[in-house]
Image: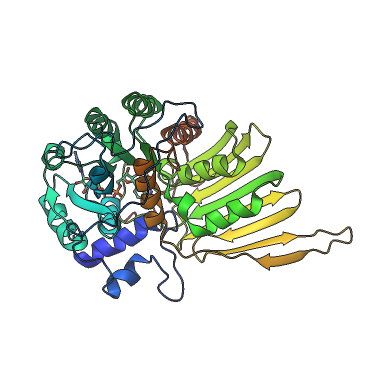
Amino acid sequence: MAFATFVAACYSACNQTGCFALGAGAVDGDIEGDMGRGLIPPRLSGCLPRAETSVRRASANRAGHPPKKSWGQHMSSKGSASGTTADIKRALRVGVIGAGVMGSNHARVLAGLPGVVMVGVVDPLPEHRTRVTAFAGCRAFETLDDLLAEGVDAVTIAAPTHLHHEIALACIARKIHILVEKPVASTVEEGREIVTAARDAGVTLMVGHVERFNPAVAAIKQAISGEDILSIGITRVGPFPPRMSNVGVVIDLAVHDIDLIRWFTESDIVEVQPQLSSAVAEREDIALLQFRTASGVLAHINTNWLTPFKARSVTVATRGKYVMGDLLTRQVTECFGFKPDGSYSMRHLPVGHDEPLRAELIAFIDAVRGGKLPAVSGEEGVASLEIAIRCLESPARPAASTAHKGPRRVVG
Ligand SMILES: NC(=O)c1ccc[n+]([C@@H]2O[C@H](COP(=O)([O-])OP(=O)(O)OC[C@H]3O[C@@H](n4cnc5c(N)ncnc54)[C@H](O)[C@@H]3O)[C@@H](O)[C@H]2O)c1
């Protein structure tokens, strides 16, 4: 793939979540902007780590699981298992499995994090290995065993979803902490096996629901904290992705929003009413999904690959507020102070500028170092996957008019 095409693919995939926001100018974390301005970090895998100030040992966590071992307690094959001060100060050795669109970005971000040694990436494709070496300035290996032989404490898994289960179990068996890209696995059963294996081994398992780290999403979450949530509406639409994978919009896109609905409401989804249609692609390319949570919140997701431009928006109605967020421009507004005469007040909320992927990977590293419950647990990843799969139980129907099926080009 030509470099420019690869950049476009990176941009497109990351914009699934709006994690690299579009706008008039290059926003912080905008991949195109960073590359255009030569801001991709240089080779940092040999950089000196910043000394750790403390390593916290967790007792029982919220889910009642046994405490996770912190990374100093089970070192990689090249580290000692003593947990001495020297170990604690040692940089965390991290690898990335899969050097495609997401994996390359994981490698780029990890290579720039203080206290992290980016050991390398694994990919069976030589051209992807070559590309990531230039892109992220790190080493590349052909097989997982080659990477593990170098000694790693943690890996992120950004290989195709159908390989997550096998790769995750292989890493867990070596007591390596893992961040698995979303969706956590191809099936709920596989996802549960990963969760159980990680728990039994006492390693950190985090799932890459990066949208939670979008500053606009964080601002919405903060605005509705303590509010009596009534309904949530999420729109995540855009054109067909440059490369079609073997999943439709529900697994590819809506799973982000299923996670957000569960996270915003802190409640499980108990009712699912999906409407799916395959207008152009073989799998569903339009999904209108309605949900009810155990706490009684009504939510809907409108997602498709038929919109010529990307749009990602969230609205939340609570008894006291109406919050609106544009996840691309990162503008979040709330209406409040409703009066009997219909008047109300409105204000823009402050929104941060962090690159979501960077914030996510820092959260993962922190969870590994502290042996803490990660920001997005394996159980949460499986719960969102389970709801997405329930949505697929009613098959996608052809769009209303099949006579003109395929008027749009499916790129890739
Ligand atoms: N969080 C998000 O917003 C987001 C966005 C896009 C993709 N994803 C997820 O990331 C994962 C990868 O997606 P992508 O778009 O980067 O796909 P991709 O096809 O661009 O990359 C996958 C890479 O894995 C490599 N690979 C194949 N077999 C491998 C193996 N056995 N070991 C190591 N590498 C192997 C491929 O050669 C390829 O380079 C998927 O699970 C996807 O759902 C998440």
Please give left or right for residue 289 compared with residue 48 in the image.
right
Q: Is residue 214 positioned above or below 125 on the image? A: below
- Residue 190 visible here: yes
Q: Is residue 39 above or below residue 229?
A: below
Closest to the observer, 200 or 299: 200
Write the residue at 18% across / 37% down.
Answer: 80
Q: Quadrant of the N terminus?
A: bottom left
Q: Residue furthest right?
A: 341
Q: Is residue 37 left or right of residue 355?
A: left
Q: Residue furthest front?
A: 85
- Picture coordinates of residue 86, whole percent (x, y): 23, 45
Residue 94 image offset from top left, x and y in percent: 24, 47
Q: Position of residue 369 (x, y in %)?
A: 34, 43
Residue under the image location 36 percent in, 59 percent down: 12
Q: Compared with residue 133, is residue 278 higher up or lower down, i.e. above or below? A: above
Q: Is residue 409 visible?
A: no
Q: Tell me what residue is drawn at x 61 percent, y 41 percent.
A: 265
Point 31% across, 59% down: residue: 10
Q: Is residue 17 left or right of residue 125?
A: right
Q: Is residue 319 left or right of residue 280?
A: right
Looking at the image, what colour scheme do you see? rainbow
Give x and y (percent) for residue 51.
30, 54
The one nearer the camera, 33 or 386, is 33
Residue 270, quarter of picture: top right
Label total for image: 0
